[in-house]
Amino acid sequence: MRELVKDNQIVTIVPQDFKKTNKGKVLDVTQDGFRMELKFKPEGLNVNHICDFYSFTENGYLYFESYIQALENNVITIANPVKHRFLQRRKFTRIKFVEDLELTCGDVTHKIRTLDLSAGGMKIRTNENIDIEKDYNLVLKLSEEQEIKCKYQLIRVERDDSGYYTISGRFTMLSNIDKMTLVQYCMKKDMETQSKRENNS
């Protein structure tokens, strides 16, 4: 565990209720796990419940799943993770994501279909001519409980022979919790896809 987490390292913890996301500073590391002092009250965090953990390290963006062994006031003890994974700092996990959504800017609304998704942005397709100079409001529904509201900024637009536009864009005005939620969502979907491939091979 000492190779992954060090004293004073900042770690974000995301429980099943992502709205209860918290963060804290590592107090000490042992062979069995580590203790950390939370910045906020540990609402939504329960002993023995699996949570997602994220932290910036010198090796990249660390991600792992584990559970809380003990909880006392704002200090929690985390068990060693079985598996971990590093994400490159400059590249978020991108997944296939097909949904019919809307982009809005004032009174203007454009119907779009998403093609893929990452915590940094998404690729979309539409037959409507969208003004690349404007930033659009977007509501991204990940599940019945998870909804992300942000701005969508167009970066590149390509038009094919059939008259459809394929657009790449990035998210702006994302809160830290929303960005963490997108990282978590894309990571889990990507791992589910990899597991299915391995089981079918």
Image (spheres, rainbow, N blue to C red):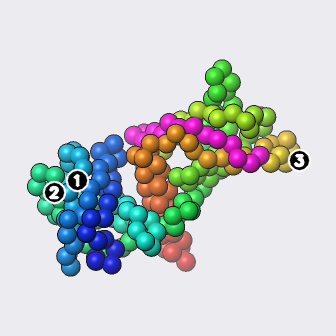
Q: Is residue 27 visible?
A: yes
Residue labelled with disc 1: 38
Q: Is residue 47 visible?
A: no
The range drawn in magenta is 144-157
Q: Residues within 10 Å of mark 2 (few under 14, many from 20)?
A: some
Q: Residue at x 32, y 60 (%)?
A: 11
* Numbered mark located on residue 75 in the image: 2
> Looking at the picture, how far across and down is residue 26, in whole percent?
24, 64
178 left or right of 69? Answer: right
Is the stretch drawn in magenta largely helix, strand or loop? Answer: strand
Determine the CA span between mark 1 and mark 2. Answer: 6 Å
In the rendered structure, which amino acid carries the disc numbered 2?
Answer: Val
In the rendered structure, which amino acid carries the disc numbered 3?
Answer: Asp
Which quadrant would the N terminus be assigned to in this image?
A: bottom left
Q: Nearer the viewer, mark 3 or mark 1?
A: 1
Determine the CA span between mark 2 and mark 3. Answer: 59 Å
Mark 1 and mark 2 residues within 8 Å of each other at the beta carbon: yes
In the rendered structure, which amino acid carries the disc numbered 1?
Answer: Leu
Q: Residue at x 62, y 53 (%)?
A: 116
Specify whether residue 159 is painted magenta: no
> Looking at the picture, how far across and down is residue 33, in whole percent?
22, 72
Residue labelled with disc 3: 161
Q: Indicate the secondary structure of the residue bearing disc 3.
A: loop
Specify whether residue 147 is painted magenta: yes
Query: Viewer-proximal residue, 9 or 121?
Result: 9
The tag earlier along the polypeptide, 2 or 3, is 2
Mark 3 and mark 1 residues within 8 Å of each other at the beta carbon: no
Which quadrant would the C terminus be assigned to in this image?
A: bottom right
Q: Residues within 10 Å of mark 3 (few under 14, many from 20)?
A: few
Q: Indicate the secondary structure of the residue bearing disc 1.
A: strand
Q: Indicate the secondary structure of the residue bearing disc 2.
A: strand
